[in-house]
Amino acid sequence: MEEVRIERRASLEVLRAEASEELGVVVEERLRHGEDPWAFMEELPTVDELVVHMLRADAIIADGGRMPSHVRHYRVLRQIALEHPALTSTVWRMLDQEDPRARTA
């Protein structure tokens, strides 16, 4: 079984600040283009979801840019939850949203 290693690039607080800033930019751009915030705010990820996506992207880059298989994707997200306990509920919620069968099990 291949071990998942994720290089730590910053503290969770710094990652959350980066994600919050990024989301702010996205919201501002969409507002400038005349979009109604009531129409798009719910489709944007939360700050913690964006942090998980950023950490997952780091893992993909560390693996030579190869897109992960379903099993590796699960392991990467699980490793993120283990390394950042504050993101655990976000990781499991994201996994549950990806696999509708998980809700019936």
Image (cartoon, helix red, strand yellow):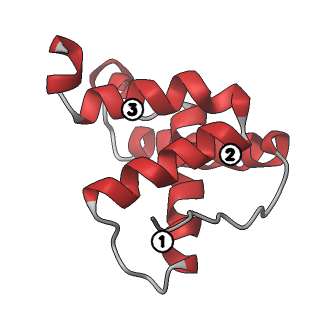
Q: Secondary structure at mark 1?
A: helix
Q: Amino acid at mark 1?
A: Ile
Residue 75 rendering spot, x and y as whole percentages:
46, 51
Say if residue 51 shows up in the picture.
no
Quick check: marks 1 and 2 in contact, CB under 8 Å? no
Quadrant of residue 72 within the rendered picture: bottom left
Within 10 Å of the Cα at label 2, are there few (<14), some (14-19), or many (20+) other Cα atoms? few
Determine whether 52 is above or below 69 in the image: above
Q: Give the labeled residue for mark 3.
A: 94
Give the residue displayed 40% in from the left and 34% down from the top: 44
Residue 39 rendering spot, x and y as whole percentages:
27, 23
> Would residue 79 be found to the left or right of residue 76 on screen?
right
Determine whether 71 is above or below 28 in the image: below
Q: Secondary structure at mark 2?
A: helix
Q: How many marks?
A: 3
> Farthest front residue?
1
- Mark 2 vs mark 3: which is more N-terminal? 2
In which quadrant is the C terminus drawn? top left
Give the residue displayed 57% in from the left and 56% down from the top: 54
Determine whether 24 is above or below 69 in the image: above
Within 10 Å of the Cα at label 1, are there few (<14), some (14-19), or many (20+) other Cα atoms? some
> Would residue 60 be found to the left or right of residue 95 on screen?
right
In which quadrant is the N terminus drawn? bottom left
Q: Give the labeled residue for mark 2.
A: 21
Give the residue displayed 64% in from the left and 66% down from the top: 5
Q: Secondary structure at mark 3?
A: helix
- Mark 1 vs mark 2: which is more N-terminal? 2
Quadrant of residue 41 within the rendered picture: top left
Q: Give the labeled residue for mark 1.
A: 60
Q: Amino acid at mark 2?
A: Glu
Residue 2 rendering spot, x and y as whole percentages:
48, 68
Q: Amino acid at mark 3?
A: Met
